Structures are given as C-alpha cells and as structure tokens.
Image: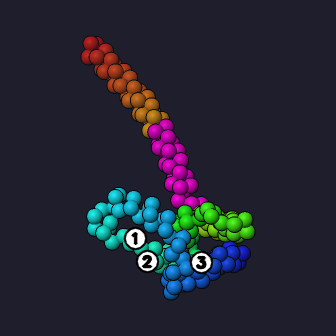
Amino acid sequence: MNLLRTAARTMLAGYFVVNGVKAVKNPEPYAAEQERFAATVVPLAKKVAPVEVAETLPEDTETLARITGGLQVAGGLGLISGKGRRLGAGLIALSMVPQLMGFSAKNLTATEKSLARNELLKNVALLGGALIAAGDTEGRPGLAWRAQDQAVKLSKSVDHTRKQLGKDAELTKLQLARSVDNVKHRVALQAKELAH
C-alpha cells in the first residue's frame, strides 16, 4: 500500500464520515435532498422488490437521510481502514445518488443558482473520486483481467495439449503401420519357409 493512496483515500473518506455522522444524528437538514429520491426510486424499488423487502423500504425522507448517512459512514470507514476499500468507495458512490437527484435550481436567484451549481459540481467531483477509488486495484490486476488471463492461458494449454495429442496420434499411427508391415513381412517369410 503506498502512502499517497492511503492519504488520498483518508482525505476523501473523511468528508463522508463527518457528513454521514451529521446525517445520522440530525437528518432534518439532509431530508430535503432525499425528496426526489423518495418520490421516484422508492416506489419503483417497491414494485420490483419481493413483498418482504418492499414492506420494509422507508418512504420518509428523514429515514432515507439517516440511511444515506450510515452508508457514508460505513463506506468512509472502509475506505480509511483499507479493509473493503473498494466496497466502501462503492457505498460512498451509492450514497451520492440521492444528493445528485435532489439538485434543483428552480425558483432560485442568480446568486443562489451559482451556489447551487458549485454544490452540484462538488458532489459530482466527490462522486468521481469515489468511483475512482472503487475501481482502484492498487496496481494489481482486477478480477476481469485475471479471469481473461486465465482463459487465455487455458486456451493456450488446450491448444498445446491438442497439438501434442495429434503428434502422439501420428507417431502411434506410424509405429502401428511399421508393426503391421513387420508382421506382414514375418508372415510372408514364414509362408515361404513353409512352402519350401
């Protein structure tokens, strides 16, 4: 693990841990950004999810804000500790969805629109950082590359084995043909001897 990655992950995660704790303790200021999520995603999830799950999905924005805060704390701690860092970064990215969905510049003054735009850009940048952290394999090949590499190696191994089996079959065929010729020759010699 390199020091730069550790420091960068800690800086990114620190923001989410602090905001997540705030949202869990006092969800009221964060509830407004959950309204669009509660109005669009939750009903869709209730239609798609099994009945047992759909019944437990919260609809009130304060509970959703607490859940989002919990995701941010859990994701941030995973990112800071390095244990489950990619999963933690994924949780952080997931927690940003309601904030991005909640953005609206309607009925705002020019100054408020400018501030809202800056907040949106900040959230998009944080989401980008979380997505980069979620995809970071610390220089090691990812699962997809390793699976593809194993498939290539297996294919080469199969091709090599097939070629070797073909060579072995040709060699066996030649040896068998020689053996048959030898037997024919011996039979012909014995037939001559018997004829004399």
Q: What element does badge 3 sit on? A: helix
Q: What element does badge 1 sit on? A: loop
Return the residue nearer the eye: 161 or 43.
Answer: 43
Q: Amino acid at mark 2?
A: Thr
Q: Which residues are magenta?
A: 136-163
Image coordinates for residue 131, horizontal then vertical, percent: 60, 64
Task: Choose top left, top right, bottom left or bottom right for residue 101.
Answer: bottom right
Task: Choose top left, top right, bottom left or bottom right for residue 44.
Answer: bottom left
Q: Which residue is located at x 30 percent, y 62 percent?
A: 50
- On whether residue 13 falls in the magenta region, the answer is no
Q: What element does badge 2 sit on? A: helix
Are circles 1 and 2 on residues that touch, CB within 8 Å?
yes
Q: Amino acid at mark 1?
A: Glu
94 displayed left or right of 46 = right
In the image, residue 180 above or below residue 98: above
Residue bearing the label numbered 1: 59
Are circles 2 and 3 on residues that touch, CB within 8 Å?
no
144 displayed left or right of 176 = right
* Mark identifier at residue 16: 3
Q: CA distance from mark 1 to mark 2?
A: 8 Å
Q: Which residue is most to the top?
A: 195
Q: CA distance from mark 2 to mark 3?
A: 18 Å
Task: Choose top left, top right, bottom left or bottom right for residue 77.
Answer: bottom right
